[in-house]
Image (tube, helix red, strand yellow):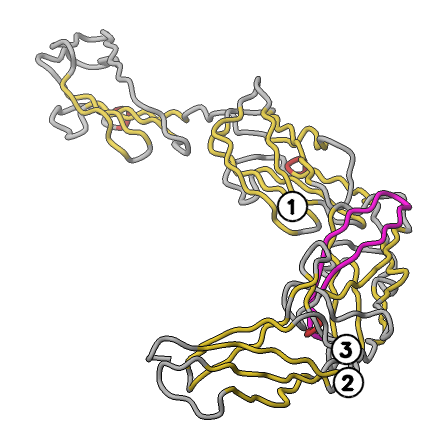
């Protein structure tokens, strides 16, 4: 500041403004300012992005009578900080693309301008967002690598990374904020070659731990017609449209495997068609989905039909406390034989229960296997306690 008029006695007020915000309004540091003398007043302040002008005013309240009030104010533009100029410098992958595996994309982010803070980064695959991240700081001298992982599907895939997608920075050049890479991911191609059930003659109901819950084997042959492995895929088995069993399988390129899936006989009785579907969850995007399934007729197996033919007891007349022997006659009227074989092939007896009222008072085991159209007998003796 300079005094172009008569000597000034005493202090005077100096004010600073950033745009229209007052940041300093104090008396001069020294009193008196003679004709032609100059005085310097300084003030530190915190620059806020977006501020454009600094203005200094001497005697803002016009308390000094002057010849010229027009030169009491001077404004200067504030230097603007360098805006960020973000760039996706590269987009690479941690390993070769393979359907059904997890892949990691690595993006190198650079900044050709001023420092950027809290920058959002997005990864997309075929337009689907797979990751959103925030990078705390990207400076001019320190590129940053960010990464995202996803499960690869077969087919043509466009992997894209976008930095500052919401345009929160004053980046003057946005064409390099996006980088994408298109890759063709080869895929497996599975086919169900054959489905086999035991024939009506082969099935023996003398199986399993409990009668009529024997596990029937379904033999399925599945082949991979591609050079690319399948990873783990699911195989589903349906009877007349209802899911009854399933398994998993993993095939290398050009490999064929046969699997054996067991399902309880009760899931098949009374149904006519079996359908087996490989890749039942459609996890693979295959060039040919038409051969993923095959059907087979369900045989009409010969089943047993058990009947309690007769119950007799000895003596005919008895009293409380007396021992009584009951004789039970059971017939198999069906076409299939009936029995139980424990795991390991050891034949077990067939249980028959005896009740008085609703209370089971005895369980007897019939010996052996009931052949079709055959009768067997069992006996049990009750006695002793008056409550029986």
Q: Establish if 337 lies above or below 145.
A: below
Question: Pointer 3 and pointer 2: residues touching (CB < 8 Å)?
Answer: yes
Which label belongs to residue 373? 2
Residue sitting at 64 percent across and 90 percent down?
309
- Label 2: few (<14), some or many (≥20) within 10 Å? some
Quarter holding the N terminus? top left
- Front residue (pair 234, 305): 305
What element does badge 3 sit on? loop
Residue 46 coordinates in the image, percent (x, y): 32, 24
Say left or right for 268 vs 170: right
Residues 324 and 208: in front is 324
Determine whether label 3 and label 1 are within 8 Å by CB.
no
Left or right: where 131 falls relative to 153: left
Above or below for 388 versus 157: below
Q: Which residue carries the number 3 mark?
A: 371
- Work out whether mark 3 precedes mark 1 in sequence or the reverse, and give the earlier one: 1
Q: Residue at x 29, y 35 (%)?
A: 20
Lower sequence index among marks 2 and 1: 1
Estimate the x, y position of residue 387 in percent, counting from the top left.
33, 79
Q: Quadrant of the C terminus?
A: bottom left
Query: What is the crowding at mark 1: few (fewer than 14 residues within 10 Å), some, or many (at least 20)?
Result: some
Front label number (3 vs 1): 3
Q: Is residue 256 magenta?
A: yes
Q: Secondary structure at mark 1?
A: strand
Question: x, y (%) of residue 368?
Answer: 70, 70
Residue on which disc 1 sits: 124
Q: Is residue 211 left or right of residue 65?
A: right
Residue at 28% across, 18% down: 44
Does residue 2 show up magenta in the picture?
no
Magenta region, residue range: 240-264
């Amino acid at each position: 500041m300079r005094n172009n008029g008569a000597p000034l006695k005493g202090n005077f007020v100096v004010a600073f403004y950033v745009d229209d915000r007052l940041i300093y309004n104090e008396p001069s540091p020294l009193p008196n300012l003679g004709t032609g003398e100059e005085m310097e007043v300084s003030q530190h302040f915190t620059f806020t992005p977006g501020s454009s002008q600094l203005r200094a005013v001497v005697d803002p309240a016009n308390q000094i009578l002057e010849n010229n009030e027009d030169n009491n104010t001077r404004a200067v533009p504030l230097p603007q900080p360098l805006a960020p100029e973000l760039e996706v410098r590269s987009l690479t992958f941690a390993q070769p693309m393979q359907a059904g595996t997890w892949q990691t994309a690595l993006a190198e982010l650079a900044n050709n301008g001023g420092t950027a803070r809290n920058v959002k980064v997005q990864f997309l695959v075929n337009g689907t967002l797979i990751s959103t991240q925030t990078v705390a700081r990207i400076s001019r001298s320190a590129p940053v690598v960010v990464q995202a992982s996803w499960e690869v599907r077969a087919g043509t895939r466009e992997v894209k990374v976008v930095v500052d997608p919401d345009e929160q920075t004053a980046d003057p050049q946005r064409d390099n904020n996006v980088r994408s890479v298109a890759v063709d991911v080869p895929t497996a191609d599975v086919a169900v070659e054959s489905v086999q059930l035991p024939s009506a003659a082969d099935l023996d109901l003398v199986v399993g731990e409990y009668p009529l819950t024997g596990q029937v084997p379904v033999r399925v042959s599945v082949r991979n017609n591609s050079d690319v492995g399948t990873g783990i895929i699911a195989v589903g088995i349906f009877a007349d449209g209802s899911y009854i069993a399933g398994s998993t399988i993993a095939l290398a390129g050009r490999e064929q495997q046969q699997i054996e899936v067991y399902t309880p006989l009760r899931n098949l009785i009374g149904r006519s068609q079996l359908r087996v579907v490989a890749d039942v969850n459609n996890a693979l995007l295959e060039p040919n989905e038409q051969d993923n399934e095959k059907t087979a007729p369900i045989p009409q197996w010969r089943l047993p039909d058990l009947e309690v033919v007769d119950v007799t007891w000895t003596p005919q007349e008895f009293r409380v406390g007396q021992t009584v022997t009951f004789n039970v006659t059971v017939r198999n009227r069906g076409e299939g034989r009936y029995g139980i074989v424990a795991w390991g092939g050891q034949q077990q007896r067939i249980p028959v229960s005896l009740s008085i009222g609703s209370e089971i008072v005895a369980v007897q085991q019939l010996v052996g296997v009931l052949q079709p159209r055959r009768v067997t007998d069992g006996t049990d003796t009750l006695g002793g306690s008056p409550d029986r």
